[in-house]
Amino acid sequence: MDITKPEDECFRPSELDELTETQRAPARSTDRPNATGLDSKLTLIKSAADVMTGWRAAETVAQLAMAAGDMGEWVWDAESNLMSLSPRAAEIFELPSNARVSREQLGARLSADDGAMTQREFDSAVRERGDFKVEFRVMRPSGTRCWAAVRGRGVYSDAGEVVGMIGIVQDVTERQTSDEIRGHLTAVIESSIDAVISKTLDSIIQTWNPSAERMFGYRAEEIIGKPVTVLIPPGHDDEEPAILERLKRGERIDHYETVRVRKDGTLIHVSLAVSPIKDAHGRVIGASKIARDISEQKRVEEALRLTDRRKDEFLATLAHELRNPLAPIRQATLIAQSPSATEDQKRWSHELINRQVRNMALLLDDLLDISRITRGTLALRLEPTDLAAVVDAAVETAKPVIDAKRHQFSVQTPTDRIELIADPLRLAQVLANLLTNAAKYTDPDGRIGLSVRRDGGHVVLCVTDNGIGIPPESIGNLFEMFSQVKSSKDRSEGGLGIGLALAKGLVELHGGTIAVKSAGVERGSEFIVRLPVRTYHGRPEVRAVQISAETALPRRVLIADDNRDAAESLALLLQIEGHEVTAVHDGREALTAFESWKPDAALLDIGMPGLNGYEIARAIRRMPGGRDVTLIAVTGWGQDNDKAQALQAGFNHHFTKPVEPDALTALLAKSAPAAK
Ligand code: ADP
């Protein structure tokens, strides 16, 4: 540290000599009295003492400053290239006290990078006659490390040759560490995805990170110095005083969910964490605030709540829909049993039961389909399909509902044949669903229309009605599962809210789209299905099932089902059809019956006590004559993998309960009698 020279000058040896002279001599020659007589001698001695005192004082101040700054001194002698270190300087480098070491020896205490940089700076300071100023890490032999700041100034001969350098060294580890930590913290704050803001206790914004900029739309320079209340929307005015109150008590506020306003006036849901900032004496001087954008979380929560509510409503509707047919079925059964019932009344009861059971089965089919679509396991049976036939089938299904409400119904189809590669049953299901909805959601005597037209490579099917219409806020999620328009529920005649979701899934499986338009409540609706027209180049496969007199022979049928009612009623039905039937109620009985009775076909329930249906099927296939028998699985589980499992176990066919008697009769007729 130079206390006698201006910054940009270097010491020369002659100057050092002069300095020593000056330091020994009185401060100024003009102050020197005439050296005659005692007085003058005393004066001279006194002046010398003053100078000495002044010099010692200056030296003491310098020493104090060095000690306060925890600094050590060093001197480099150019000729010997040795560095002399004061005890403190030696301590910093973990060298013996008052060490004399070469520059290379000292350099070995530095990392390779720091060593090279220090060398460069030293050479340049000597060359440029500038100050030598570096900071480097010291790797001590004990394994500890520290940061050292070094300053030095060259000493030059009159000829301009460098003769040495004197300087100081200071352990700046603490400052470096806090600088490093500050650097890390700044980087963390800058890269944080949360808004990090600090403010004074008067709520004046002090710092504002890039995320705060993104989140609230204000740039740092336009918001720093403004009150934080610019971010608080009306209705939340009491929040800031309450937060400040808690902060002043030194409290921290966590997970405070609220709403803030952006520069553009839009609202944003945030979760706040506010902590007091304290000074060195522990006094609260401000607050740091971390705001997390939770808009997406709020949106997801809201969507989950909606889905959950829809699911609850769905379960309630499902229970209602499943319970609904039970009352007429029970009443019809009582009528059929009544001794006083006429033949007509009995027939009517049977038709009613038939109708209700078919409706329940359709409902369950829809449920299974929607679950398959959601899991992506529904497969289409694609084939060349005449669109007119699909339209006819759909109209036939929906006609009873349309007629029951006396709607006017018009169909417009092009005269040209339109052929698609499609699953005709599934397409008809979609169209029938749209037509049935149109009839359901239109008051009696309404108008329903179906039009079909070509549009380039597509065919467009439109189902229109002049019914209750759809409010704009419901249009967006109408095709979601369990979505039902609240206002239309009172006027609907039942339904689970899955028909349109199913229709959308099926249309998309065909590579098409479905959309809805409505001018609003009571303004009617229009559902538009667009399907790609794909030309089929192969020969259409003609599939016809003919039941010949020979194959329609009566069969011996074994029925195994632990649900006695199900087994007995099916047995009765088949007996009425002319088949010979034996019904048993557990797995072992089924095997015994098969062995002794040798049926042509066996209808096996899967979940049974003793042996389950799969085990029976496998056992039968291994028994003599077991290969020829037609095995039919009858289960409550209709998923594709249930079917696959049944086929693997050796079944020829799989039916989902309730078995459609007509389908079973047709199947039995087709199956050859087992070889006896
Ligand atoms: P569901 O008819 O069983 O309730 P859908 O999925 O077929 O289920 O229809 C969902 C909802 O869409 C219905 O509950 C109804 O609110 C509304 N909707 C469907 N079709 C129409 C239509 N043609 N007119 C008015 N609203 C309709």
Image: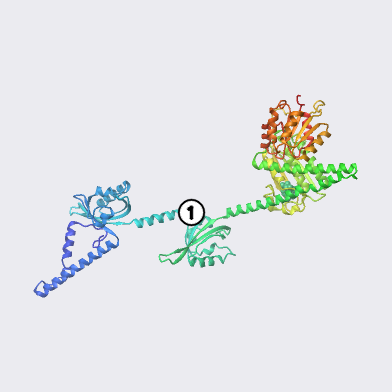
Depth check: 322 or 632 in front?
632
Compared with 44, 99 (above or below) is: above
Q: Residue furthest left?
A: 37
Q: Residue at x 58, y 53 (%)?
A: 297
- Residue 556 image-quadrant placement: top right
Q: Quadrant of residue 130?
A: bottom left
Find residue 540 and report its horizontal and vertical position in percent: 72, 29
195 above or below 607? below
Report x, y in % for residue 527: 72, 45
Tell whether circle 1 marks a residue whose Cβ is less than 8 angstroms from ligand 1.
Answer: no
State the image coordinates of residue 479 (x, y, percent, origin top left).
69, 47
Which quadrant: the C terminus?
A: top right
Residue 671, horizontal then vertical, whole percent: 76, 28
User: Furthest residue to the bottom?
Assistant: 39
Q: Is residue 637 above or below residue 205?
A: above
> Is residue 343 rendered to the left or right of residue 84?
right
User: Which colour scheme appears in the figure?
Assistant: rainbow
Q: Which residue is mark 1?
A: 192
